[in-house]
Image: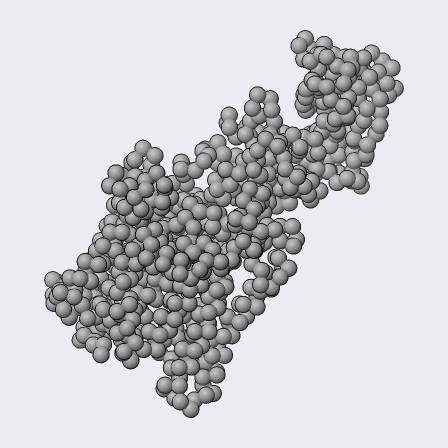
């Protein structure tokens, strides 16, 4: 029988304890916060959030390079509409979207940094809900509070709080479902349980099994309480299933829209439930690298606790939790990657931790009445907390690195001992951002002290003046602590905006800020270096669509096909590229120079540059075949010119010149210039004509300044010797004079709106 202490019967505002518990756990998670993308899963989920925020789409086209590089192992798959879509549940991307939106609104915090506060908040909320669920099951306040505290600090939730993996959110959704349907029966709680199940489905479709088990639980409980109440059973199950059924229908329709099949979520035939149960179960339960009991020893108490719970009046709840855990265990034990890839412990089982902690409640209740039992449980809790500290303060990438070879937990302790910490508040030189560290310790310490004084057993409260009726001032303190820890987090994130751990620096941040101001939603951005994908997830706030390409020495057919698609779909393309090496241009740059109209280049450092290209509508350009001979083995045989001669300032004039240099041996260059009526240069661009080339084109996009006066302007072409500057006279096309430049076209710039000519604008 579960006993309730007299202390529990006193009026006790739950929100005070909840805020104190939240502040304490969030202070722990802030201490170990990294804000660093560490997995392909996180990149994929963030890419969905980015596109949803900027253009209300769910594709991940910026990760197209992963499909080219990793094939079926990529985090996205090609949809029926030609876009790339993530395999991950769309729920996590939508849940973190408010954080992403808030960061973009303020602009002083990287959107990824703020998004990485999502799991700390989720894990802290999970600790609160474990406490509330244990209380609703009739356990003493101290027992319930101990479960909440240990769920957040003695299990893998702590190391996972610094990631963006979706498992903590799945765990909170499943726990919410259990809390809603196992507590006091009410129609609103049943609806909320359905909402929690809908959320779980949006995160992972395999959670549909939880819906079936929940329905069976409701049937069993209602049959026990009212064997003849068939109508009430059907009604409750209908209300529970209403929202999940709608959610499942929407998710299936979403699959059909993306991949043309209701049951296809993007996973390939290689990604199946192909592992034998024996191998998967042994790995998840007993292996040194992935056992849930090794990484969270406190969960060993779930087995005896669950057996004790089955023998209590809460047997139906125990069976519900056991079956939820068992079905998930069997599902993931058979998955081809049963361990969850490179992650701290068994990643997929993290979602089961909150409900498994509920099964430990009888053991804690038993240990609270026996000194020896309390020592054993306390020792197990200390060991569990120590393991989580090692995992949370160090990088799991290093813990699993083969060069260490001593197992992930032992390696993590070694990294911790030698000061190789994984933390956002520690600079590259090893110095800490002390206000965040000391602030987190201070707030966490105060929250812990108030929890002890306010909710602990009366015999342990050293201050007799702190009574249950002291809740108003404790409540005010809890509000201040909660606001304080959130404010401290925001202050800390604003101070690590220029995160030096990323693969780029202030030059690329300045480039991103320039794009924010110049790029339009109708533009496209090409990043020619896939290693900078994560950087631009942090700092790209422009509304333009971004496509990240592999950094390689040659274009693949898939890359060339995408480039052809882009130049037909967009009028402006921005190319983010490193400077050319020894005159050799990047592959995407060479292709765009040939197939689009280069406008201008911005250099932000020796390593970062931005090139703008203009693609006019095909009907606005006309090809004129000509023959202009320069008598030096250089021949001009074609001009692509606009069909209009009327222009507004701030427009872009596209021009293409077709050359043949097969007979030239001199170091020749060509200069295209925009001249006013006094033959003063308004704009100029020089290009090399060196090398034996047949029928090649140089594309130009002449930007007209916004303040360009009304008048006539000439587009002139010059060919000259790069060594001595000697100009060569063109022959042909009515060029009878000895002028050393060729007039290509005359433009009339008009600043008024009183003409009907087609005008090309950026």
- Say if 432 sits above or below 383 in the image: above
Q: In the image, residue 629 lies at what x, y percent?
A: 82, 17
Residue occupying the point 37% across, 63% down: 352
Q: Nearer the viewer, residue 126 or 226?
A: 226
- Say if 205 sits above or below 165 in the image: below
Q: In the image, residue 547 lies at what x, y percent?
A: 59, 42
User: Does residue 517 appear in the picture of this structure?
Assistant: no
Residue at the limit of the structure toward the top, as seen here:
724
- Tell me which corner region of the image, top left, top right, bottom left or bottom right, holds residue 712: top right
Residue occupying the point 42% across, 67% down: 327
- Tell me which corner region of the image, top left, top right, bottom left or bottom right, holds residue 328: bottom left
Q: In the image, residue 154 lies at what x, y percent?
A: 27, 57
Q: Nearer the viewer, residue 319 or 532?
A: 319
User: Does residue 297 appear in the picture of this structure?
Assistant: yes
- Say if 68 sits above or below 182 in the image: above
For this view, does 462 lie left or right of residue 644? Answer: left
Q: In the image, residue 339 lies at what x, y percent?
A: 41, 54
Q: Nearer the viewer, residue 491 or 403?
A: 403
């Amino acid at each position: 029988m579960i006993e309730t202490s007299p202390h529990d019967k006193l009026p006790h505002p739950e929100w005070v304890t909840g805020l104190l518990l939240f502040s304490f756990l969030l202070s722990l998670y802030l201490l170990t916060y990294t804000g660093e993308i560490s997995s392909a899963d996180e990149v994929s989920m963030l890419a969905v959030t980015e596109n949803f925020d900027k253009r209300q789409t769910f594709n991940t086209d910026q990760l197209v390079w992963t499909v080219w590089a990793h094939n079926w192992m990529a985090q996205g798959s090609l949809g029926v509409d030609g876009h790339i879509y993530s395999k991950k549940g769309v729920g996590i991307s939508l849940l973190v979207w408010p954080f992403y939106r808030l960061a973009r609104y303020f602009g002083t915090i990287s959107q990824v940094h703020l998004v990485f506060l999502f799991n700390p908040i989720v894990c802290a909320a999970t600790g609160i809900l474990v406490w509330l669920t244990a209380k609703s099951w009739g356990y003493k306040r101290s027992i319930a509070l101990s479960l909440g505290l240990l769920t957040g600090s003695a299990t893998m939730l702590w190391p996972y709080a610094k990631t963006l993996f979706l498992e903590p959110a799945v765990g909170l959704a499943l726990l919410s479902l259990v809390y809603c349907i196992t507590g006091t029966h009410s129609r609103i709680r049943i609806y909320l349980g359905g909402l929690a199940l809908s959320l779980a489905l949006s995160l992972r479709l395999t959670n549909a099994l939880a819906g079936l088990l929940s329905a069976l639980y409701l049937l069993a409980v209602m049959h026990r309480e009212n064997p003849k109440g068939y109508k009430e059973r059907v009604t409750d199950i209908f209300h529970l299933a209403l929202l999940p059924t709608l959610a499942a229908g929407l998710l299936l329709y979403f699959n059909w829209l993306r991949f043309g099949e209701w049951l296809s979520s993007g996973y390939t035939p290689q990604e199946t439930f192909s592992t034998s149960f024996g191998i998967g179960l042994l790995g998840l339960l007993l292996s040194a690298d992935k056992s849930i009991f090794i990484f969270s020893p406190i969960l060993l108490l779930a087995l005896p606790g669950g057996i004790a719970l089955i023998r209590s009046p809460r047997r139906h709840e125990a069976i519900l939790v056991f079956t939820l855990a068992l079905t998930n265990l069997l599902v993931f034990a058979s998955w081809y990657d049963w361990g969850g890839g490179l992650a701290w412990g068994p990643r997929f089982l993290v979602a089961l931790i909150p409900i498994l902690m509920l099964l430990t409640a009888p053991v804690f209740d038993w240990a609270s009445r026996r000194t020896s039992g309390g020592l054993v449980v306390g020792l197990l809790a200390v060991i569990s907390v120590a393991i989580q500290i090692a995992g949370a303060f160090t990088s799991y990438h290093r813990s699993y690195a083969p060069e260490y070879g001593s197992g992930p937990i032992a390696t993590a302790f070694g990294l911790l001992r030698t000061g190789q910490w994984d933390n956002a508040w520690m600079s590259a030189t090893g110095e800490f951002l002390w206000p965040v560290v000391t602030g987190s310790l201070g707030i966490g310490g105060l929250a812990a002290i108030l929890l002890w004084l306010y909710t602990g057993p009366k015999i342990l409260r050293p201050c007799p003046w702190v009574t249950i009726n002291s809740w108003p001032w404790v409540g005010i303190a809890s509000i201040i602590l909660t606001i304080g820890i959130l404010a401290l987090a925001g202050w800390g994130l604003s101070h690590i905006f220029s995160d030096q751990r990323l693969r780029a620096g202030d030059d690329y941040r300045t480039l991103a800020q320039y794009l924010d101001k110049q790029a339009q939603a109708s533009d496209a951005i090409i990043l020619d270096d896939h290693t900078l994908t994560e950087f631009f997830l942090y700092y790209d706030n422009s509304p333009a669509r971004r496509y990240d390409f592999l950094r390689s020495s040659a274009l693949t057919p898939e890359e060339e096909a995408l480039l052809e698609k882009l130049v037909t779909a967009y009028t402006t393309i921005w190319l983010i590229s490193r400077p050319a090496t020894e005159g050799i241009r990047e592959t995407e740059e060479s292709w765009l120079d040939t197939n689009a109209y280069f406008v201008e280049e911005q250099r932000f450092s020796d390593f970062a540059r931005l090139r703008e290209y203009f693609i006019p509508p095909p009907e606005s350009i006309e090809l004129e075949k000509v023959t202009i001979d320069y008598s030096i083995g250089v021949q001009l045989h074609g001009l692509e010119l606009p069909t209009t001669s009327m222009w507004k300032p701030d427009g872009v004039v596209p021009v293409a010149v077709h050359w043949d240099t097969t007979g030239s041996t001199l170091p020749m260059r060509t200069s295209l210039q925009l001249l006013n009526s006094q033959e003063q240069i308004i704009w100029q661009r020089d290009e090399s004509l060196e090398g034996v080339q047949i029928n090649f084109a140089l594309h130009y996009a002449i930007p007209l300044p916004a303040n360009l006066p009304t008048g006539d302007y000439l587009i002139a072409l010059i060919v000259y010797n790069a060594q001595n500057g000697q100009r060569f006279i063109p022959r042909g096309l009515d060029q009878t004079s000895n002028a050393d430049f060729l007039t290509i076209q005359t433009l009339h710039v008009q600043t008024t709106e009183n003409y009907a000519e087609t005008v090309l604008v950026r």
